[in-house]
Image (tube, rainbow, N blue to C red):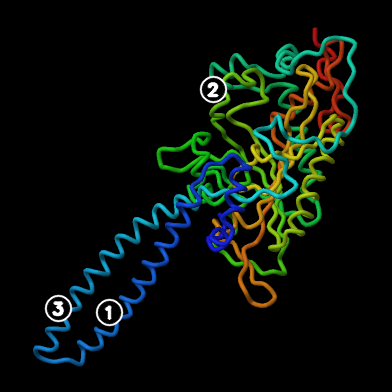
Amino acid sequence: MLDIKFIRENVALVKEGAKKKHIKVDVGRLVELDEERRQIRSLLDDKRAEQKRMSNTILLAKGEERQKHIESMRYLKDGVNELNEKYKKIMEEWKALMLEVPNIPDISVPVGDGDEDNKEIFVWGEKPQFDFKPSAHHEIMTKLGMADFERGTKVAGFRGWFLKDDGARLMWAIRRFVEDRFMNREGFTPMIVPSLLRKEPFFGTGYLPQGEDDLYKTQDKEYLAGTAEVATMSFYMDEIIEKSALPIKFFAYSPAFRREAGSYGKDEKGVFRVHEFEKYEQVVLCEASHEESVSQHEELTANSEALLQELGLHYHKVINCGGDLGLGQVKKYDLEAWMPSEERFRETHSSSYFHDFQTRRLNIRYRDDDGSLRYVHSLNNTALAMPRILTHIVENYQQADGTVRVPKVLVSYMGKEVIGAHAE
């Protein structure tokens, strides 16, 4: 959420930011409502002050004079109630519009409509070369008994899956690998966080109201989160943090759930796009400084790049265009690893910073050196999403005989160097 004072003073900039993100919001109407809101607020304050003065007068008055003052107080009270109702209606519309106003993207964010307009800024490694036509991950995993997608669909429905034998072992190996790389990383606090959450954390992080179609909702009106970011970011909701504690860095794990609304026909086979998965997330709260946010953003992204490099996966880094940014993101990088069967890069990680967009909604502040309260800045980054990463590993390490080499960094966790070496 942007500061309303900032919106009033920078209407053109806010409109341009929304245009760059391809988000429709009536900023002009919001400013009009805000003017009405402030005027009525001022009138209410005046009338309540008058009520207080009249109450004191009534206490001192006697007889007919007292009765006249009581009658005047009734009219004054009716006027206050009428203004209150008007104020409530204006505030409902004002709050709804405030939640729709997007954060302003950084000047370095390229103009574009969607992910096809993201700009490549870095490439690591070489494309794997095959002397055979590479198979898709779901074909390899089915043939090697690593997964059962037919029974997954039978039991869990569309996009259902079972990982078994070396598929399950590979998943557990990757978990331990990621945990070893992050669990003792300096400055990070490891956490296991809930996925079933109240609506407030979703509004706070910007997943509601716009992203409701992609969320699973329970009969108790709670939601299942699609990332550990939602719960982790809300850990300090409505709290004041000591400046000396900043930056606060979390390495958080949770199951994750997404309806994948609007993705019908995309990635229907395998485990690249599924409804139920697991995520390790990096979340940072830091001082309200653009320079600090940028520094933390680069550090978080570098952490994820290091994981891909250790796994030996050819990838590139892109800066997301305006049309591929979410409501609150100031800037975002995607890391995309090579998929041999598709001959293109596919996303493995995303890394974003928000300034105080989320923390203003969540009311997370710190006391600055001069004693003033400021909203902290927030960042998040995918440490690793599973089982999606299996798709890249299996495809990039497949061999002509149908087996799959295990990446060197995972061999000690798997206890073997090749998957399917003894398969008939």
Query: Nearer the observer, disc 1 or disc 2?
Result: 1
Residue 243 x %, y %: 69, 69
The earlier-in-sequence mark between 1 and 2 is: 1
Which is nearer the eye, 273 or 222?
A: 273
Q: In the rendering, which numbered label is found on residue 304?
A: none
Q: Amino acid at mark 2?
A: Ala
Count residues near mark 2 (Cα–Cα under 10 Å), then give few for <14, some for 14-19, many for 20+: some
Q: Residue furthest top?
A: 424
Residue 395 quadrant: top right
- Image position, residue 181 (x, y; %): 81, 44
- Name the residue tied to disc 3: 71
Secondary structure category for the residue under label 2: helix
Task: Please state, as top left, top right, bottom left or bottom right, where the C terminus lies in the image.
Answer: top right
Disc 1: which residue: 51
Residue at (62, 48) in percent of width and height: 17
Numbered badge on residue 156: 2
Distance between the Cα atoms at labels 1 and 2?
Answer: 63 Å
Categorize mark 1 by other alpha carbons within 10 Å: few (<14), some (14-19), many (20+).
some
Residue at horizontal 90 percent and vertical 18 percent from the top: 129
| Farthest residue, direction left | 64
Residue 15 at x, y = what percent?
57, 49
Query: What kind of element bears circle 1?
Result: helix
- What amino acid type is highlighted by mark number 3? Glu
Does residue 42 appear to the left or right of 244 in the view shown?
left
State how far apart marks 3 and 1 are (Cα): 12 Å
Kindly report which numbered mark, 3 or 2, lies closer to the viewer in this rendering: 3
Note whether 261 is above or below 1 in the view shown. Answer: above
Task: Identify residue type, mark 1.
Answer: Gln
Q: Can you give x and y, in whole percent of width and height, for residue 40 in the image?
A: 36, 66
Of helix, strand and loop, which one carries label 3? helix
Q: Quadrant of the N terminus?
A: bottom right
